[in-house]
């Protein structure tokens, strides 16, 4: 009798930033933890989060996530003031912070958030080193996607006939 090895690590996506892949070339992807408050974790479990306009800044040898919106639940505690767009500290090693700061200093590069997900019971942020796309680049990408769709349709038709 053989048993399959299954990993006990469960990961599920909370939110994905689809605009990031449309507006930027993603050169490299990184993962980090986030420092969150209790009400933020509850809101994340409910899916009340928006990271489409968020970005990452280095400040005093620490990395922070700016402009991410986590909506407080209406049942949150009344004695805690909830700031939905506060800066959130990223949990990274010093050598990772140094590497990212050096790469970000290149002209045209930025760090943008790509997705939030659960890894076991920990909330993780996936972010990327990105370079902005021009209007011409966006047109070329759109043309390539349309060609891929047409190619699949043509292949499907030829397989049906044969």
Image (cartoon, helix red, strand yellow):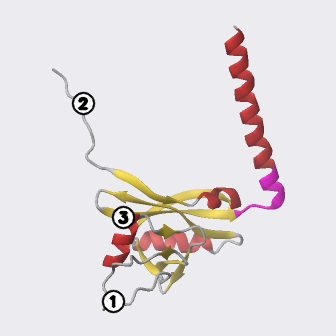
Q: Earlier in the sequence, mark 2 or mark 3?
A: 2
Residue matched to label 3 = 45
Residue at the spot x=64%, y=60% of the render? 19
Q: Secondary structure at mark 1?
A: loop
Position of 9 compared to 124: left or right? left
Start and end of the magenta stretch?
A: 132-139
Mark 1–mark 3 CB contact (< 8 Å):
no
Report the Cα–Cα distance between label 1 and label 3. 19 Å
Report the Cα–Cα distance between label 2 and label 3. 30 Å
Circle 1 crowding by C-alpha within 10 Å: few under 14, some 14–19, many from 20? few
| Residue 5 lies within the magenta run | no
Q: Give residue 45's position: percent from left, percent from top.
A: 36, 64
Residue matched to label 1 = 80
Q: Main secondary structure of the magenta part?
A: helix
Residue matched to label 2 = 4
Q: Residue furthest top?
A: 162
- Vertical comparison of 120 with 104: above or below: above
Q: Secondary structure at mark 2?
A: loop
Is 81 or 89 nearer to us in this picture?
81
Q: Quadrant of the N terminus?
A: top left
Q: Quadrant of the C terminus?
A: top right
Mark 2–mark 3 CB contact (< 8 Å):
no
Quadrant location of residue 14?
bottom left
């Amino acid at each position: 009798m053989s048993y399959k090895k299954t990993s006990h690590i469960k990961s599920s996506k909370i939110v994905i930033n689809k605009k990031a892949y449309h507006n930027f070339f993603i050169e490299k992807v990184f993962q980090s933890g986030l420092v969150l408050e209790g009400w933020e974790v509850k809101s994340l479990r409910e899916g009340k989060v928006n990271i489409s306009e968020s970005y990452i800044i280095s400040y005093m040898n620490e990395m922070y996530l700016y402009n991410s919106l986590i909506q407080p639940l209406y049942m949150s505690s009344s004695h805690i003031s909830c700031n939905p767009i506060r800066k959130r500290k990223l949990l990274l090693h010093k050598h990772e912070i140094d590497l990212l700061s050096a790469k970000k200093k290149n002209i045209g590069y930025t760090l943008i958030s790509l997705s939030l997900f659960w890894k076991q019971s920990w909330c993780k942020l996936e972010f990327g080193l990105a370079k902005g796309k021009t209007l011409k680049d966006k047109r070329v990408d759109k043309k390539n996607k349309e060609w891929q769709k047409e190619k699949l349709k043509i292949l499907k038709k030829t397989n049906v006939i044969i």
